[in-house]
Amino acid sequence: MDQGRLPGFLRLVESGSSGVLDPNGLAGPMLWPTVATGVMPAVHGILGALELRADVGGVQPVGARSWHAPPVWQVAAEAGMAAAAIGIPGTSPATAWPGCCVVDDRYAAAPTSEWEDWPLAPGCIAPVRLREALRPLRVHPGELDAAARGGLPAGPLAAAVSIHAAAAHVAEHEDWRLLTVYYGLLAADGSDAAYEFQDAMLQRLMHLAGPGADTVVVSASGVLIAAGPGFARDAVLHGAGPADVAATVLARLGLRRPGAAGRVLDGTRHGPLRDCAATPRPAPAPVPAGSGGPPPGQEAARLVAEVEHHALVQRGLAALAGGDHAAAALPLRAALAVRPDDLSALLLLGQCAVFLGDHADGARIGCRLAAARPDLPWGAMLAGASLALAGDDPGAAPLLAEAAALAGADPQAHVRLGALHLHLGRPADAEGHYRRALALDAALPEARAGLGLVLVAVGDAAGAEVQLRLALGLRYHAPALHLQLGTLQAAQGRLVEAAASLRTALAQHPGLPGAAAGLRRVEDAVARRAGAG
């Protein structure tokens, strides 16, 4: 670990894309806390930008009190390493993070008034000795004229500049082993100019950090770039899950979090790891019903209902990200009780019903969706899938034909239809939908993977391998595809390649059914071949 003054450097970057880092679908407010903590939303506890107040009398923004699991900067600080966090959403007040240098997300939040009337929020900087140094580094949107903005939006640009100025000051003048910085510019503007500006800020921070520092760039659109002495040159890091980032960063600091969801990414160099014993951040005690809290007014009651609904949907999404459809169905039903018109939650609940084998409920939900939005394919698809899986092919056929017609130019709809037909043992229909999806979006990994599986089913091993490799090039963290690729290679007698693919599958998912047994068979075959030679 003695590889320079500043061996740990993590930069969080927001993206304007609605895509996410992992294929399970962690999105929005759940993503960045998962990146920072290495645990899933059900554990870290941040399910939205707002939360109910403890007295149930209204809502409040999430803040430092909302984190029920310690993020990497707190873990590092409690292990005796200087750590800093600049601009991370949901970290206010900065003074709530003992032992850390923190500039919370209120620092760059400019009011509509001019610079002279812009007070520095109380408690937004820790340690407090940095307040006077960082106060004048902020940039107000009103200071940026059209020429200075270069076409970028004034508010997000000014906030990014302010955060960068604080990060550069900390990087240059404070001692640190881990520096985390969050920029929100790309969430507001995804233009080439915004990316070029972002790259320039990164280049400045890397210069200040020095050649001994590792740099990790994370984007919500699925980008993960790492460089520095802690990473093997040309290591493939794309397609990693959000929790893998925290595990990898902690490993570079010689730490690991027992029971964390993430894995240390391949190509990371580190010495022996010791378990970290970061202090959990306890959840606030629930307020009993009728405890005498102030009754919410009409507007507060509306906000409370909105936040309750949002939190329930996010809990459902968090459970789905973990593959637990039974656990997801409960909060989704509760969310629909609060807002019966939420068709997105209804679709998620219908998917849960299909996975849980409750095909009658899936069909009912599909019909309800189709009645509400007859112009979209999802209702007919859900109802048709439920009937087909229940064995009612005559009833399913017209619904699936309607869904295919409505899918039109939506590649994701064709991917879903392809997966259903593949599951039903109809490879020709599945291939048609996957190829249609690829014609609409050639870089869609699910479509490449599905086409590969179709070609496996029809016995085209060579074509299947081409498609599986293309899918892995688009999303490398896909253990089931590595397993399928290894199985194909083993069937062709390419045992060394098969073993490598199966080891990758196990590294990405140690409990993947069939991977360990398949690897043992391949290794036994390699040993027999060596003995015979």
Image (cartoon, rainbow, N blue to C red):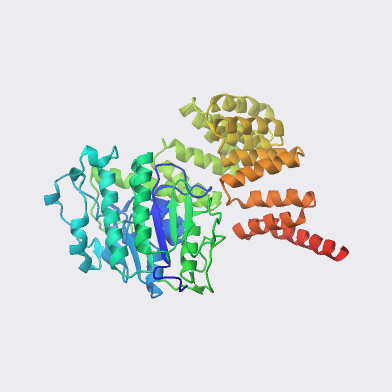
Horizontal and vertical percent position of residue 269: 53, 66
Looking at this view, name the residue that lies furthest to the right: 532
Residue at left offset 55%, top offset 41%: 351
Res. 46 in view: no
Horizontal and vertical percent position of residue 43: 45, 60
Residue at left offset 27%, top offset 49%: 159
Residue 428 found in image quarter = top right
Task: Locate residue 369 relative to residue 512 in the image: left or right.
Answer: left
Task: Locate residue 427 relative to residue 326 in the image: left or right.
Answer: right
Q: Nearer the viewer, residue 124 or 70?
A: 124
Q: Nearer the viewer, residue 177 or 55?
A: 177
Image quadrant in which the C terminus is located: bottom right
Q: Nearer the viewer, residue 38 or 47?
A: 38
Residue 130 found in image quarter = bottom left
Task: Locate residue 319 relative to residue 454 in the image: left or right.
Answer: left
Horizontal and vertical percent position of residue 117: 12, 51
Horizontal and vertical percent position of residue 461: 75, 42
